Each structure stands twice: as C-alpha cells, then as structure tokens.
C-alpha cells in the first residue's frame, strides 16, 4: 500500500513510544504482516486484551498514519514494527502464535511470485517466527491470489481449519480492515482461510 508521505511523518515516527521491544507478559503474540493504516490490529488489540498484537508495516509513510490512530487508544497489548517482512526473524524468532495476512499485494505477474506473502519462500521464513504450531489467517478480495495461496499452503503442509469464499455471509468472528470495508461496500466478496500445520 503506497501513499504520499504525510508532512509530519518523521515527527510522528520519532515520537512513537509503542515500537516493539518485547511484552511484559507471556500472553500469545499475534502478528499482522502489512498492517496498513492500522484499523484491524488496533481493533483486535482492543477486543482481545489477553492477546499481544504486533503490526508490521514496510512503508513508514503508511505506518505513520497507523501510529496516529493507535496513539488515541494506546492499548498496552499492541506494538508496531516498521520493517520488511523478510527480516522479521531478526526480532521475532520463536515468538509468534498466529500470523494475519490481510489483503496482501497479489503481485499478479508470474515473475513476481516470490514477492507474494504466501509463496513458499515466505512460508519458510514464517517457520522461524512461530513459537509452536504454525497458524495463519488470511483474507483477500483477489480470487487468483486466494487460489494461489490455497495451493501454496497445501503444498507446504498446511491444513485448512476453516475457509470461506464469502466471509461476510457467514457467522465468523471478524474485524474488518480499511480495504475490507471498501471492497465489501462495492459488493466484492471477501475470501478467508484459517490454516495450521
């Protein structure tokens, strides 16, 4: 998700006091890779105070918007990281219980397959992050990315716990992202899968 740099981006980032530096408890850690403007991860942290949440965003311009949103509430169980997902094991090795992949970039061209967050090389990198049994929850509006991801999960040994091709028509506990709100208002069906191995 790319956007113009907010004028106060550097000030917002430099004054943020909830960057990830660990948690003072042993609660499970749930990680959202590509938190965007932070709606999902903030609402999850407020809804589930007994779970620790970390939002990761590659782009500082986007992260600064999330920081402003989170700052209003400052839940004690939410931290953020600004970094590339491929480097997450440097700070989160063996610490994560669940990974959320919400509306990731589909990278539709074949030559960009390795950039998809559900490609084999990313799934391999996630193995280093998990504390125990690997667990991923994914949502997307993109049919081709969803089918690709299902095949990728299966080939890598993941089992499907729950799947939906129209999430909002089913009774699944769900916190929406910014993209999800927009797409669903436009009548686009949201795909969902919960996998583990």
Image: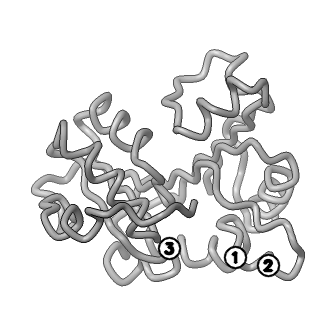
Q: Quadrant of the N terminus?
A: bottom right
* Residue 78 on image: x %, y %: 25, 49
Visual colour scheme: one colour
Q: Which mark, by number, is residue 115? A: 1
Label 3 and label 1: CA atoms lie apart by 10 Å
Q: Is residue 112 left or right of residue 78?
A: right
| N-terminal label among 3 and 1 | 3
* Residue at point 46%, 54% (across, down): 35
Mark 2 secondary-structure assignment? helix
* Residue 89 on image: x %, y %: 41, 79
Where residue 155 sits, quadrant-wise, is bottom right
Whether the residues at callouts 1 and 2 have beta carbons within 8 Å, the answer is yes
Return the residue nearer the eye: 103 or 129. Answer: 103
* Residue at point 30%, 32% (across, down): 48
Where residue 17 sits, quadrant-wise, is bottom left
* Residue 75 on image: x %, y %: 18, 41
Mark 3 secondary-structure assignment? helix
Q: Residues within 10 Å of mark 2 (few under 14, many from 20)?
A: few
Residue that label 2 marks: 112
* Residue at point 19%, 45% (across, down): 71
Residue 179, compared with residue 48, is above or below; it is below
* Residue 82 on image: x %, y %: 36, 70
Label 1 and label 2: CA atoms lie apart by 6 Å
Residue 171, compared with residue 120, is above or below; it is above
Residue 134, compared with residue 193, is above or below; it is below
Q: Quadrant of the C terminus?
A: bottom right
Whether the residues at callouts 3 and 1 have beta carbons within 8 Å, the answer is no
Residue that label 3 marks: 85
| N-terminal label among 2 and 3 | 3
Q: Residues within 10 Å of mark 1 (few under 14, many from 20)?
A: some
Residue at the far front: name it. 7
Question: In the image, which is nearer the foreground, mark 2 or mark 3?
Answer: 2
């Amino acid at each position: 998700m790319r956007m113009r740099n907010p004028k106060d981006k550097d000030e917002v980032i430099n004054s943020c006091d909830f960057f990830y530096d660990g948690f003072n408890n042993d609660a499970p850690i749930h990680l959202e890779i590509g938190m965007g403007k932070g709606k999902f991860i903030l609402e999850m942290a407020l809804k589930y105070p007994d779970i620790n949440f970390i939002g990761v965003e590659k782009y500082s311009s986007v992260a600064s918007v999330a920081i402003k949103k989170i700052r209003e509430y400052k839940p004690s169980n939410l931290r953020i990281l600004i970094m590339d997902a491929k480097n997450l094991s440097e700070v989160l090795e063996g610490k994560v219980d669940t990974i959320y992949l919400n509306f990731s970039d589909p990278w539709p061209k074949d030559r960009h397959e390795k950039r998809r967050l559900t490609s084999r090389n990313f799934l391999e990198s996630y193995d280093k992050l998990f504390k125990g049994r690997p667990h991923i929850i994914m949502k997307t509006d993109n049919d081709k990315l969803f089918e690709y991801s299902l095949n990728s999960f299966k080939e890598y040994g993941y089992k499907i716990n729950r799947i939906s091709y129209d999430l909002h028509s089913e009774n699944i506990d769900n916190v929406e992202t910014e993209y999800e709100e927009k797409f669903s208002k436009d009548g686009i069906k949201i795909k969902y899968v919960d996998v583990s191995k």
